[in-house]
Image (cartoon, rainbow, N blue to C red):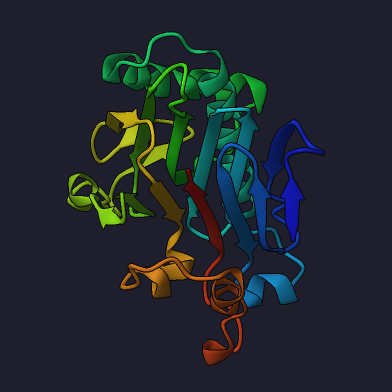
Amino acid sequence: MIINAELVELFHYISSQNEEQKVSTYQGQMTCRYGYGRAKKTALQGGSGQDFLSVHIKGDRCNFVICDGVGQSNQGSSTTRYLGNTLLDWLDSTIDWSSKEFLSYMEYLPVVAMKELQNPISSDTMYICGRLELPTLENPIGRIWMAWQGDSRLRFWRNGVEVSQFFKGTMRAEERWSISEGPLGGEPHVYQSRLEYGMPMRLQLHTDGLRDLDPIDERLPDEQIQILFDAPHTDGLIEDAAFLEFEW
C-alpha cells in the first residue's frame, strides 16, 4: 500500500500492538516504509506485542521511535507504548539536543511515569528514537539526530555505501531503559550528523524479530520484507518485529 503525499500533507503512524501491519509505504519529500508483526504465539493467544513503532512526518521533518520490550508481560507492552509516545512528544518539543540533556530527561522520566501510570510494575524496554531534518535547495545542509539503548538494529547508507560503523559496538542487549530506574547498563548513545543536499541516503531500523535482515545490504522490495514478517520458514514470527526505513 502506498500513501500519496499529494493527498496527505502530514503522515502519522502509531503501531497497534494488538494487530499486524503489513509493509506499507508513505511517499513525500522522503519515502518511509514501515511494518509491524507479533510473535505467532502472542497472536494466537490474542495478546499484545512487546514492540512499538511510531513515526510523524511533516514536510521535510520527521520524528520516529522504535521500542522493543524486554521480558514477557502485559506491563512490558504498556512500557514500550508509554516510552514510545513520550519520546515522540520530546522530539517534537525539545530545543536542546545535547547528550547531557537527553540523559537528564531519560533519568527523570521514571518520576513522571510513576505519577502518570500510578506506580506501574517495573519493566524495561530497548529503544531507538530520532529526528530527520532534510536538506533542501533553500537550506542545503540538513541534520540527523538519534539516540538509543539496546540491540535493535540501526543501519545507515550514504550514496549507496553503508556507514553504520559508529553504531556497531553500541547496540548492546544489556542496555535498556527501566520505567522505575531510568537508563540501565550505561548511558544512552547519541549520534548527530549533517545531511548534504543531493546525496541519496537510506536509514533502516528494526527490532530483533527481523534478524534475518541483518546480513542483507541491498534494498529489498516490500514483498520480500513482508515474507520475513510472515516467516513461513518458522511457521510465523518467533518474536515480535517492527520495521522502519527512510529514503531521501
- Tell me which residue sits at (30%, 16%) in the image: 98
- Tell me which residue sits at (75%, 31%) in the image: 9
Judged left or right of residue 9, residue 242 is: left
Judged left or right of residue 136, residue 118 is: right
- Decide which of 162, 188 is in the foreground and name it: 162
- Decide which of 43, 230 is in the foreground and name it: 230
Which residue is situated farthest in the top direction here? Answer: 95
Horizontal and vertical percent for residue 18? 75, 58
- Tell me which residue sits at (64%, 43%) in the image: 78
Which residue is situated farthest in the right direction here? Answer: 7
Horizontal and vertical percent for residue 121? 56, 40
Judged left or right of residue 230, residue 192 is: left
Horizontal and vertical percent for residue 159? 31, 50
Classify 213 as above or below 188.
below
- Tell me which residue sits at (43%, 17%) in the image: 139
Classify 57 as above or below 158.
above
Horizontal and vertical percent for residue 213? 40, 70
Tell me where residue 192 sits by quadrant: top left
Image quarter of the N terminus: bottom right
Tell me where residue 10 sits by quadrant: top right
- Decide which of 170, 117 is in the foreground and name it: 170
Q: Is residue 135 visible?
A: yes
